[in-house]
Amino acid sequence: MQLDWSALGQVAAVSVGVTVAVVTVFALGVLGLARVEAAREENGTGSSTVGLTQAGLCFVACAAVVGYGIYLIVPQFH
Amino acid sequence: MDHITFLVAVVIVTALAFDFTNGFHDTANAMATSIATGALTPRTAVLVSGVLNVVGAFLSTEVAKTISGGIVDDSLVTPGMIFAGLVGAILWNLLTWLVGLPSSSSHALFGGLIGAVWVGAGAHGVHFDKVVEKVLIPAVASPVVAGVAALLATYLAYRLTDRARKKSVTKGFRAGQIASASLVSLAHGTNDAQKTMGVITLTLISTGALGHDAGPPLWVIASAGLAIGLGTYLGGWRIIRTMGKGLTEIQSPQGFAAETASTTVILTSAHLGFALSTTQVASGSILGAGLGRRLAEVRWGVAGRMVIAWMVTLPAAAVVGGVSASVVTNGGNIGAAVVALVGAALATGIVVLSRRNPVHAQNVNDTHEVTLRTGPPATVGSAA
């Protein structure tokens, strides 16, 4: 029996890398959203453009990863 | 349809029953953390998961080409052995559900088949090196990888959002959880329903009802998809409680990190051809997420019992599968009927036992323990 250590290492590296990246980007998006909500609460009608942009970019990036995940799951796409 | 003998009919019914237990045993993998954090209500969670499992079953065309993935010699396998193996897997799934332990449905199926083939065809029918390669190594490696990924991600998520408003953070991650949990469910449907389809299709091929290399007929796809979806929708609340509450108290950033870790580990390994257990990956992720949050309590006793269940799953299912196989091989149709009746009786017994302390959608988050005893009656000591 031979074990494919390199494939196992690949799974480990890719999994850890992707998970950390997705969660970090998502956390940044949540931060942006929190900023928007904080601004809205402080001055009534005001909003935070920076926060909104940050949240938008981060969530779009996460959505792209989800899309790729669905692409991997559904064999008809390959 | 005259190819379908009594035994084949029994195998199909048993395979669908296994698929059903597979569904409700594994709801927790995708949904336990979302239910625990309130990202989804229990009822919505199982509905979403059930539907996605059915969708997944129809989507995937890559039906398992072998019954066991090479763990046993498929040319020696008879419908009787498949039946015996399935009985072993079902009983083990039900027993672990009763005590609320997440154990791998795939390992139960492999174990049942190994036992049945060992008894029915001899030890040479079992490829032990494949068992190590396909079962043992991934079983050790995958939860560790998922756990490390979830630990790092959780730690970073808390560090990054440390100063932000707690309410916004919780809300944001809850929304994210809906997407990440749904992906786990979809991946589960494409994987696990295929196993049952493979078992039924190969049984039909072995009796000549289908030609060689035939794909699964539509009724097989539909019934397997519905069985796993229905099982998922019914919800294995006992296991959901253990995974969502028992291992550690989960907050929404942890839930998101755990589900993301599970999804990536499942998808990358499937992509590279590793067979692994969704259950073990999800449990590893949840433990990692528990360790990644400062001051989060991880109940190592629960984790330890879970690991023991993982180690026992394969041999225990193998013993039941072996015993059933010897009855079926020696007793023919009557033997199969006896095994089916005894199996059904044991399954009913387990369900009746579970009624003593039922866990359902309404009380799943109330406590972190799954016990068989109900609390002491309130009127103890009153004069009677």
Image (spheres, coloured by chain):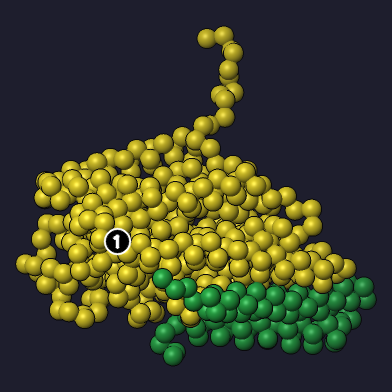
- The structure residue drawn at horizontal position 34% and vertical position 38%, both measured from the top left corner, is B349
The answer to which image quadrant residue B251 occupies is bottom right
Identify the colour of chain B in the image: yellow
- The structure residue drawn at horizontal position 12% and vertical position 57%, both measured from the top left corner, is B6
| Direction from residue B14 to residue A5 in the image, left or right | right
| Direction from residue A25 to residue B284 in the image, left or right | left
In this view, which residue lies farthest toward the right? A43
- The structure residue drawn at horizontal position 25% and vertical position 76%, both measured from the top left corner, is B216
Q: Position of residue B198 (x, y in %)?
A: 29, 70
Identify the colour of chain A in the image: green
| Direction from residue B198 to residue B104 in the image, left or right | right
Quarter holding the N terminus of chain B is bottom left
User: In the image shown, does B354 or B323 lie closer to the viewer?
Assistant: B323
In this view, which residue lies farthest toward the front? A1
Q: In this figure, what is the number of numbered marks?
A: 1
Residue B44 visible at all: no
Q: Position of residue B52 (x, y in %)?
A: 46, 71
**Is residue B61 depicted above or below B354 in this figure?**
below
Residue B242 visible at all: yes
User: In the image shown, does B44 or B203 lie closer to the viewer?
Assistant: B203
Q: Position of residue A47 (x, y in %)?
A: 86, 82
Q: Position of residue B359 (x, y in %)?
A: 51, 44
